[in-house]
Image: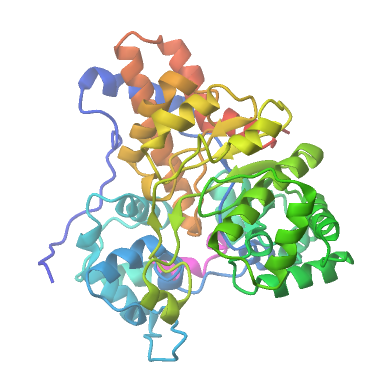
């Protein structure tokens, strides 16, 4: 363990701004325009039960550490077993259940996060949400734990109260087509004014490689009273569930496919592929073809029902086979891989690319495609928009690279502002603060280089922080 020393926790008002004094001065003025704007979080993975039940969060460990794969991914890379961090194992082996011990373990290794966005998010939540003024270390660990634990018992730290204090205008969760959305129903029935809506994530019923795909499709048929043994019954069932999600506020769908491959094949080929998929007889190339066809089918449905379509491709899921077998998915072993958009999207774009009523928001884990593929595509096709820097790249440098590689070709107005895409509720204000600061820094550079004037930059800053995301996700009130 590295030696740590007590330090006061200080969040500098100029954090993430340029060290160039002229650029920093402009960035400060721009940031004043956006700092207090409401937060619109159009895509993420927070738990709607938090807001439906509005019960106190249990303890700092289950709030900060256990749900955050960014944190335990780094710790695991340094040889710290996930069991010591309270992560359940399918093998039934011992796991640490004492939240204070887990917190102390994390505190021992907090130095691992120096220079990372995780450190920025953690410090922001500590400082602004819980009033912590000491840096986390082995010496301060228990004091900070008790300080947070005490505040979690207070009414102003209940989920709904935090939602209001964070100035969140809309928060979108993400659910399976098989979800009954009971928590969203309960939120609406409660009379609370918080706008918690859902997004339709159909992967487990459109990806034949998904676990229990056949059983999932059968359940889809039961929910919708459609014959999901036939191609048209299956499509009707998906359309029905989309309408159900819309009835509870959904404005978007989300697709986490391995690639951006799309297809537009004949009906009889679709029927044959679907029949083989239900029997579990597809090889890898046929499974990719089926997923590609389903992206095109989803685009057609979005043109019909108005749901905004999001595509999050390019992650090699569960790369660590041993870890996956022991802890299941989402345990930090997902790795970015190259993704082709120009050829992959062409079948879908040949059919729907010129439709102004369709919105398809593209994300990537392959930064090399920003200037070569994604910006030129979004700078041409009316249906395409670029999502912000995502996952491994929702960091200060990742956000700057994104702007620098896309703006010249796609401009600002073929992008959709920022979304946090997080499971960690308390990091939402921190992530939006980071995005706003980085965008103001980038705009300040353009002003100081006399490429735009400051009045234009001020308008763009507000658009990037607030207006573009509402327009793109059809959240306009």
| Left or right of 184 on screen, residue 230 | right
Quarter of the image with the C terminus is top right
Q: Which residues make up the magenta segment? A: 148-158
Near-viewer residue (309 or 120): 309
Q: Which image quadrant for residue 357?
A: top right
Near-viewer residue (249 or 371): 371
In the depicted structure, whether residue 225 falls above or below residue 396: below
In the depicted structure, whether residue 115 falls above or below residue 457: below
In the depicted structure, whether residue 51 falls above or below residue 328: above
Q: Residue 304 lies in magenta, yes or no?
A: no
Residue 474 position within the rendered picture, expressed as x and y whole percent measured from the top left: 70, 35
Residue 118 position within the rendered picture, expressed as x and y whole percent measured from the top left: 34, 54
Quarter of the image with the N terminus is bottom left
| Left or right of 122 on screen, residue 113 | left
Q: Which image quadrant for residue 441?
A: top left
Q: Residue 157 lies in magenta, yes or no?
A: yes
Q: Residue at x 45, y 55 (%)?
A: 315
Query: What colour-coding does the image apply?
Result: rainbow
Residue 251 in view here: no
Residue 454 position within the rendered picture, expressed as x and y whole percent measured from the top left: 41, 12
Taken as a whole, is the magenta stretch helix, strand or loop? Answer: helix
């Amino acid at each position: 363990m590295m030696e740590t020393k007590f330090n006061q926790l200080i969040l500098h008002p100029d954090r993430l701004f340029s060290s160039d004094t002229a650029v920093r001065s402009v960035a400060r003025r721009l940031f004043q325009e956006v700092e207090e704007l409401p937060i619109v979080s159009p895509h993420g993975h927070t738990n709607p039960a938090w807001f439906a039940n509005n019960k106190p969060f249990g303890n700092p460990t289950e709030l900060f550490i256990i749900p955050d794969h960014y944190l335990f991914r780094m710790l695991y890379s340094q040889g710290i077993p996930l069991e010591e961090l309270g992560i359940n194992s399918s093998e039934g082996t011992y796991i640490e259940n004492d939240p204070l011990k887990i917190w102390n373990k994390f505190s021992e290794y907090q130095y691992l996060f120096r220079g990372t966005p995780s450190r920025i998010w953690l410090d922001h939540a500590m400082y602004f949400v819980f009033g912590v003024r000491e840096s986390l270390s082995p010496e301060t660990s228990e004091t900070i734990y008790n300080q947070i634990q005490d505040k979690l018992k207070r009414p102003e730290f209940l989920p709904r109260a935090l939602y209001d204090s964070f100035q969140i205008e809309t928060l979108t969760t993400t659910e399976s087509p098989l979800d009954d959305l009971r928590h969203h129903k309960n939120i609406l029935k409660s009379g609370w004014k918080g706008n918690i809506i859902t997004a339709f994530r159909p992967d487990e019923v459109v990806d034949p490689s998904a676990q229990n795909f056949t059983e999932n499709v059968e359940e889809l048929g039961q929910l919708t009273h459609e014959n999901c043994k036939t191609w048209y019954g299956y499509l009707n069932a998906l359309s029905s569930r989309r309408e159900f999600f819309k009835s509870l506020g959904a404005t978007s769908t989300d697709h986490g496919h391995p690639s951006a491959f799309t297809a537009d094949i004949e009906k009889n080929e679709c029927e044959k592929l679907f029949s083989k998929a239900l029997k579990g007889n597809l090889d890898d190339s046929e499974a990719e073809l089926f997923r590609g066809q389903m992206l095109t089918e989803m685009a057609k449905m979005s043109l019909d029902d108005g749901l905004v379509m999001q595509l999050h491709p390019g992650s090699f899921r569960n790369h660590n086979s041993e870890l996956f077998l022991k802890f299941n998915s989402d345990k930090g072993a997902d790795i970015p891989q190259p993704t082709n958009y120009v050829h992959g999207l062409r079948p879908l774009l040949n059919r729907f690319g010129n439709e102004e009523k369709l919105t398809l928001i593209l994300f990537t884990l392959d930064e090399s495609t920003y200037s070569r593929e994604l910006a030129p595509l979004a700078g041409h096709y009316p249906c395409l928009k670029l999502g912000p820097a995502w996952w491994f790249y929702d960091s200060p440098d990742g956000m700057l690279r994104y702007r620098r590689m896309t703006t010249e070709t796609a401009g600002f107005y073929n992008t959709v502002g920022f979304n946090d895409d997080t499971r960690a509720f308390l990091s939402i204000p921190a992530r939006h603060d980071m995005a706003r600061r980085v965008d103001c820094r980038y705009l300040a550079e353009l002003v100081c280089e006399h490429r735009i004037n400051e009045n234009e930059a001020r308008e763009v800053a507000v658009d990037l922080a607030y207006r573009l995301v509402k327009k793109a996700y059809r959240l306009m009130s």
